[in-house]
Image: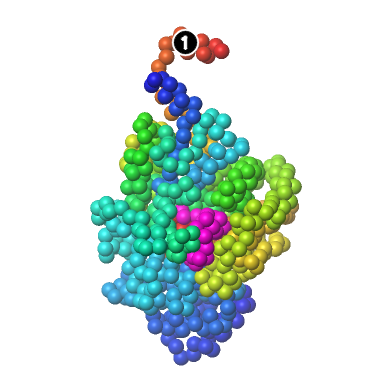
Amino acid sequence: MTNIATWARLKSPWVLHFNSGACNGCDIEIVALLTPKYDVERFGIKLEPSPRHADVLLTTGCVTEQCAERLKRIYEQMPQPKFVVAIGACACSGGVFAGNYNVVGGVDKVIPVNAYIPGCPPRPEAIIDGVVKLLNSLKPPKPIKKEAKIDAE
Amino acid sequence: MPSKEIDMIKVLETKLKGKPVQIQLGHLGTAAVQASAGAYKDVLKAMLEADEKTAVTAITGIDLGANIGVYYHIRTSNAFITIQAEVPKENPKIATVTDLMSGAAFHELEVADLLGVVFEGHPSPGRLVLPENWPEGIYPLRKDVKASEVKLNPPSTVDEKLSDEGKLVKIVIGPQHPALLEPEKFAVTVDGETVKNVEPRIGYVHRGIEKASESRTYLQDVYLVERICGICNSCHATAFVETVEKILKTDVPHRAKYLRTIILELNRLHSHLLTLGHAGLEIGYETLFQYFWRDREPIMDLIEIVTGNRVISSSMTVGGVRRDIKDTDIPKIKTVLTDLRKKLPFYKEIYENEPSLKMRMQKVGTLSKEDALKLCVVGPVARGSGVDIDVRKDEPYEAYGEIPFKVITYTAGDTWSRMNVRMDEVEESINIIEYALDNMPAGAYRVKVPRVVPAGEAVNRVEAPRGELFYYVKSNGTAYPERVKVRTPTFANIPSFLKTAIGESIADIPPNFVSLDPCFSCTDR
């Protein structure tokens, strides 16, 4: 049963995007992912407006004081198992805004982060790569023989 | 200096005879009027009487030691004038100007929030950008406040209830909401379907950039101000470096001016295509969104060819641009632009004649010309209401003075007009880039400038995709600026949304709102 759930999750991860204080640079690259040139929907990745339906939280931007509580609450609303991807230098560490008043820092100061995608902003290819790496890490470990067979195919 | 500016100064000189007012020409790069705290309103009144297009561009608050300076940056038809007043730090009180110009309300709140100036008679005092649990009596832009030492009060745990007072229902949109790409909150009070009131709560993206810029060198600040907004980043960088160049009195090479113009117009192209598509998404026309974003990608590739990066281009620097354009790239750029030009009639046809789009956009969010002037709106919002302001024409910077282009205006003032202004500006931008590529002068693309900037101050304006972007920089003779003030276009345009949304259906909020092309990372800084 768990295997089926993991399989389904890997084939169609629903993502939620939350901007906790970004400059829009990373955000427009995330939107660009959904449009014809990059079109991540072909991998089953769907942008989901409600945290209650999402598997993966894509966060952009450093965390401002006002957004910290909100970010925590959105994370808590997501069903288990949940994964957080920090997109961009600001989400990873605070970026150029680290140390400013009203800025808490990177996303990992507030919620646990599973994958970091650095860049200012990261290219859409880099974001796809990061999300795919995260998904691959969720795959249940398989016997080596079987994997070799898949590779041969 | 434009002759109109001198005309305005003459008018002021006659009207303000005997008042405690000093007029300086050429200070701050434009004209400046020094007025005592009592007389600045007389100056503003005199300007309003002389020119109907008089509007507040920005209000800068600045810590001057014993006093706090409150600078009113006023634009008129062709002149740009700064009124400088000062209030003592112990008792920083000054009368509001919102009775003369309702568009000044937001500007005053910001100065009150960040510097603690009390604007007496302000219609709705309160927090604007700082969080609710910000400690009382600490004003971040005062020099004695250290950014790292501010400790916030514990956040309030009380949730805002969706109130239901009789017939009126309060709906809170945001901070996280499917229709908002950025975290902001709007509390909409509705009676059935009709919107009765909109209360904005901005500041969710406030990152203290103005304060941070004071602890970085001028060169580092270029990269910092670029990150105010990821969409119009080149405009921010240009506005900042131009201001610093004004203080340095540096002449930028002719070729650099053309290169900057090309980068700025590419920026405008991608921003307008983004918004035109986004508007489609908001009215439930997703096909249009996908089409526009498909055609935006080649422009992103062009930005990468010219500057080296897709989004944050970091191509501007004090004294020029950081890299030259390759001759071999010019044909590539022209091919992409020609392709885009061929597609424009199709989009134009959709925006002008598609019935479902017209139903959602026409007569929605109508802003009359009078209101547009009173609320001091800028950019496509003003031009959609028939106010023909465009900094590229009014106060040409870079190569805009040498390149022929039209200022697009529509008169209906509704959402449809605002979007069509952008639609037509896409074509103008293509023309500008093609002209600049064909007439590019040879020569250097940057000059060396000293790292230490002599003491001085300057104001500067740039026409960003969303409208007039304003910068004020004060130097104290070191490598670090004393004060950097940014007024972004969305900040000036939000009051128009608050006005036009009232009385309309709640379903009209998304198209009306997106027609401002709102950018909150700009607004909050």
Pointer 1 residue: A146
| Observer-nearest of A114 and B478 | A114
Q: Chain of mark 1?
A: A
Picture layout, residue B481 above or below residue B38:
above
Work out whether residue B524 can be spotted.
Answer: yes
Work out whether residue B318 can be spotted.
Answer: no
Q: Residue furthest bottom?
A: B18
Where does residue B155 sit, x and y in percent of width and height?
27, 53
Where does residue B101 sit, x and y in percent of width and height?
48, 75
Magenta region: B492-521
Q: Main secondary structure of the magenta part?
A: helix
Picture layout, residue B71 above or below residue B195:
below
* Res B162 quadrant in image: bottom left
Where does residue B274 sit, x and y in percent of width and height?
59, 49
Q: Is residue B267 magenta?
A: no
Mark 1 residue element:
helix
**From the viewer's perspective, is A53 left or right of A108?**
right
* Res B51 quadrant in image: bottom right
At a point 31% along the width and 53% down the height, the residue shown is B159
At a point 61% along the width and 66% down the height, the residue shown is B413
Picture layout, residue B223 above or below residue B137:
above
At a point 58% along the width and 35% down the height, the residue shown is A38
Amino acid of disc 1? Lys
Where does residue B484 sit, x and y in percent of width and height?
43, 61
Q: Which part of the image, by quadrant, shows the N terminus of chain B?
A: bottom right
